[in-house]
Amino acid sequence: MLQPVTIGERPLRALLPALGPERYETCEETLRTARRALAGRTVWQVNTTAAGGGVAELSHALLPYARAAGVDVRWLVLPGDPAFFDTTKRLFLLLYGHESTPEPDDAAFAHYVSGCADAARGLASRLRPGDIVVLHDPQTAALAPALAAAGARVVWRCHIGCDAPPPSAERAWRRLAPFLDAARLMVFSTPRHVPGLWRDRRTAVRVIPPSLDPLSAKNREWGHEPALAILSAAGLFAPGYRAAAPPPGTAVARVNHVTDGPGLPVGRPLVTQVSRWDVLKDMPGVMAAFAERTADLDGAHLVLAGPDVTGVADDPGGAAVLRECRQGWRKLSAKARSRIHLVTVDMADPTANATVIAALQRHATVVTQKSLAEGFGLTVTEAMWKARPVVASAVGGITDQIQHGREGILVRDPYDHEAFGDCILRLLADCELRGRLGRAAHERVHRDYLPDRHLIRWAEALLGLLD
Ligand code: UDP
């Protein structure tokens, strides 16, 4: 029932040039301690997709370091049916504070619980005493009681939340609470998202912000020419542009143009947002912010890029959001339409997909993340690592990730298209500011969001469960 995902091995030593000797040694020492303490136990992680979205990205990035260090980490994916994912997506949006999402009815909720219970039975029979299971997000929350009853130490890793939970979010938390009581530890990305409900319970709570892997295909530092060559080979640009071939051996995913039009010209400033097609990423809002300012944007173009909508198993709303974006695009002026491009990127080969996303982020003049809520915006950190100036909404974990005015620009009201458009405009007009923000952004990621910080925090958290 639960599907295993293969985890490679990546020795921490590969990070030595990025970390420097002192940070490398500290992390190496922590991993040695963790390996000794966790000997004879397996650390299982369970989520609902191996590709697309931040949890999959993080897991591919982090778990290989733990495995190479000798920790027996395994990754399982829960493959639900459409009704299961319809319910989990609703819970996900409700916990994010999205008030117009209809709450799942009792039958739908019972179907979700029974899907989790079936999956838990399969895993419970494989557990050894003292194993640890890390469950991710509401999709897997209802596995917790059966796994705890089978002797596992259960951790619930919540990647989502909202800054001011409306009553519908509180109700969703209360529905999940009986399952989550079985967890020994709850982990959140930002202190802002620890629900009031848990502040005075006995379950331990930790805050562990995610990280990115500077060695992954997503975060490789492509120079300007290779990035152009990759985007050209992917089919992003308007016909007529002839780039050099991508570097030998580079797999490049296909970019599919969802909107008509002449395609993206080379040599114009580029604003981009890379996100799943999710209402909370507000792709239509970015489009509106950009379209309102088309006349002032001095030839800039906007690319909204997301996964091929069939590609993210646990995200059933993607096709509807993409459709809404396309309908919104059709209503724009001809001039705005010629400057705004909606594209999806094939997901069949994750490395080829990551290469194209990396080249797009690298090629962008300005990167946006106009989320309406966010646990931690991995795309924000990815752009910052590439020294891109970011304009993002001041919501959730993004407020921890970017120091406003120093490491990027935060827009206080995520629904304020005009303010968002103004910030894009300001950055496009100021090369010096873009350079300054981009350099500080890169430094910030180097300091706080590389895998050593993340591995150390997880090692501390897991060792704390062994007492
Ligand atoms: N992503 C991708 N291809 C896409 C869209 C997104 O690889 O077409 C990746 C993106 O680069 C990032 C992750 O998916 O690594 C999204 O993580 P984030 O935390 O920003 O948002 P989430 O999807 O988890 O809400």
Image (cartoon, rainbow, N blue to C red):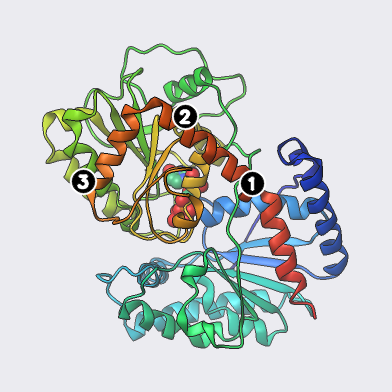
Tag 2 residue: 435
Between residue 216 and residue 25, name the one nearer to us. 25
Q: Residues within 10 Å of mark 3 (few under 14, many from 20)?
A: some
Residue in view at x 19 percent, y 35 percent: 293
Q: Which mark is residue 447?
A: 1
**Lower position in the chain sequence, tag 3 or tag 2:** 3
Instruction: Name the residue type under label 1.
Output: Arg
| Image x and y of residue 352, in percent | 53, 34
Residue in view at x 60 percent, y 51 percent: 211
The relative height of residue 399 versus residue 428 in the rendered view (above or below) is below
**Lower position in the chain sequence, tag 1 or tag 3:** 3
The relative height of residue 31 versus residue 127 in the rendered view (above or below) is above
Between residue 182 and residue 412, name the one nearer to us. 412
Mark 2 and mark 3 in contact (Cβ < 8 Å)?
no
The relative height of residue 464 versus residue 61 in the rendered view (above or below) is below
79 on left or right of 82:
right
Tag 3 residue: 418
Between residue 226 and residue 80, name the one nearer to us. 226
The span from disc 1 to disc 3 (Cα, nearest Å) is 33 Å
| Image x and y of residue 159, in percent | 51, 64
The span from disc 1 to disc 2 (Cα, nearest Å) is 18 Å
Would residue 229 be visible to someone looking at this image? yes
The span from disc 3 to disc 2 (Cα, nearest Å) is 24 Å
